[in-house]
Image (cartoon, rainbow, N blue to C red):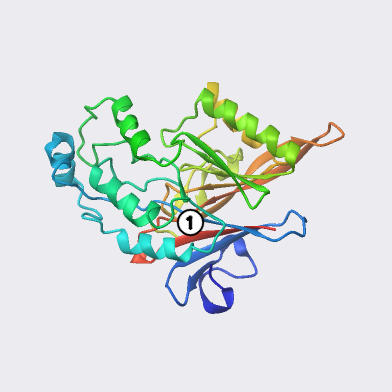
Amino acid sequence: MADLAKSTVLTGDPADPKGCIYIDNETGVRFREHIIDTGSGKEPVRICQITDIHFNKLTDEDRKNPELAYTEQCRVWLKDGGSIPSCDKAIMFSRYADATVITGDVLDFLSQGAIELMHKHIWDVDSNIIITQGNHEYRYQMQTKRPELTPISERLAILEKNWLHDIYYYSRLVGGRVLIVALDNGRDTYSDMQAKRLAADIAAAREMGYVILIFQHEAISTGKEEDTVVKAIMDYYGEFFNFYETIGHGAEGATAQVYKLITENADVIKGVYVGHLHSAFYTEIKASYINKNGEKVDTVIPQICLEGNFYDNAGHVMKIEVR
């Protein structure tokens, strides 16, 4: 983990960590910091987030699949493992953290070649790294302007077989007091299963005094109408994004239930960390909780969007510290 004394400010003011991005002088990795002070006085728990690696590579066996063969013609961005150097830098930078989570789009599209790169450059280095699904992992078609021909169930089955943990919902206790919850929301929805498991984790965390941190690919609605236009801290792909009319806004069913679970349990849920947008953003979700006196307390949950890892061939990391 980087030492601020051995880093250079890329943008922003260190006095305002919400918008400050640093460059590690030794590795060139760009990073931000998010500190959550619970007042425990205990040894800090350190977690690193990486996002949007976009491994793009095909094997000869992949090319026997007509969908993948055509995607290879159309999708030349980061072709043949072009994002490997930035991935290696970010993984090495994060090696001393208590946990590392990658929030989706590790695969640029679903190919055995990309899966092999994921294992070689991530899980063979550290099998404890958590990887959520994004909106690219389950696709054969990328920039082809053609519909998917292979049923989604078959594509998801391939991912399930090749992942080291549950692809839809995975939680892990770190440092004895921080519960990482990794959710798949790469198709803009949540499921009944996710709602049930999140409710159970929230109940357990409240009973045991744990902090919950949510990691997923896409941002959820901040619940603030003024957030229809939020400016990026650093624009790599899009300068503005609508953080109001996104997942959770006007939702129904399980998606509404998960959104409610997150936004109404801010006494235990202390951060939401996402990717997908490729640019750097900081937002705050309108939230609440019921205190010990049965009173509703209004507050906010920080929602931090990390930039894509491949930009500038540098590696980009969010350093999270729970004190």
Q: Residue at x 48, y 56 (%)?
A: 280
Q: Residue at x 43, y 65 (%)?
A: 92
Residue furthest out toward the right: 293
Q: Where is residue 255 drawn, in percent x and y?
A: 53, 27
User: In this rendering, does residue 237 appear at all?
Assistant: no
Q: Where is residue 43 drawn, in percent x and y?
A: 70, 61
Q: In this picture, is 298 found above or below 17? A: above
Q: Amino acid at mark 1?
A: Ala
- Occupied quadrant, residue 250: top right
Quadrant (top left, top right, bottom left, bottom right) of the C terminus: bottom right
- Occupied quadrant, residue 142: top left
Q: Residue at x 29, y 36 (%)?
A: 139
Q: Residues within 10 Å of mark 1 (few under 14, many from 20)?
A: many
Which residue is tagged 1?
Answer: 280
Question: Which residue occupies the foreground of this view, 140 or 196?
Answer: 196
Number of numbered discs on residues: 1
**From the viewer's perspective, is 100 left or right of 55?**
right
* Secondary structure at numbered mark 1: loop
Question: Which residue occupies the foreground of this view, 207 or 77?
Answer: 207
Q: In this picture, is 212 found above or below 99? A: above
Q: Where is residue 293 drawn, in percent x and y?
A: 87, 34
Q: Where is residue 249 drawn, in percent x and y?
A: 54, 31
**From the viewer's perspective, is 43 left or right of 20?**
right
User: In this rendering, does residue 240 appear at all?
Assistant: yes
